[in-house]
Image: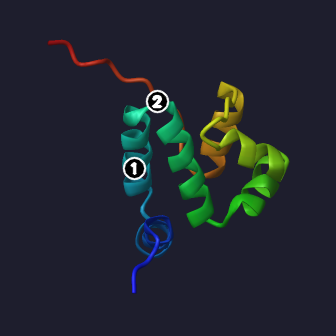
Amino acid sequence: MTRDYNEWHLERLREEHADNSTYIAGYLTACLEEGEDVFLLGLKKVAQALGGISELAEQTNLPRTHLYKMLSEDGNPTLTNISIVLNSLGMQLQCVPTEQT
């Protein structure tokens, strides 16, 4: 019997990494390095693993439907909303110098 990868990955995030903020930060950073759409989907997975979109909506005072749209592949969130979501997940935006070759 096979399992859906997304279900498996979400379960791993929830069971093995939910209490590991360093892992979550690294995961989100890796997602961002892959592109904005991958970052938004990664942020959605983290939110689902750490309590779900409904709980995130309560914590952020953003409508649940708005969060689903914002964190979709076609989402176009504002920097303010990304900061609100990250803050509720115990994360923050950070700028670092790019590597110079």
CA separation in Å, label 2 and label 1: 14 Å
Q: Which mark is residue 94?
A: 2
Q: Which mark is residue 100?
A: none
| Residue 69 occupies quadrant | top right
Residue at 43%, 35% (x, y): give it: 32
20 lies above or below 96: below
77 lies above or below 59: above
Q: Label 2's element? A: loop
* Quarter the N terminus occupies: bottom left
Label 2 vs label 1, nearer the camera: 1
Front in this rendered view, residue 82 or 71: 71
Disc 1: which residue:
27
3 lies above or below 36: below
Give how far across and how far down residue 4 sits, in percent: 47, 71
Q: Is residue 19 left or right of residue 54?
A: left
Please, what is the three-letter code of the amino acid marked with disc 1?
A: Tyr
Front in this rendered view, residue 66 or 84: 66
Residue at 20%, 13% (x, y): give it: 100
Give how far across and how far down residue 56 sits, in percent: 72, 56
Q: Earlier in the sequence, mark 2 or mark 1?
A: 1
Give how far across and how far down residue 95 sits, in percent: 43, 24
| Residue 75 occupies quadrant | top right
Q: Label 1's element? A: helix
11 lies above or below 29: below
* Quarter the C terminus occupies: top left
> Which residue is at the far left?
101
- Circle 2/circle 1 CB separation < 8 Å: no
**How many C-alpha atoms fall within 10 Å of the one at disc 1: few (<14), some, or many (≥20)?**
some
Give how far across and how far down residue 81 sits, in percent: 71, 34
Please, what is the three-letter code of the amino acid marked with disc 2?
A: Gln
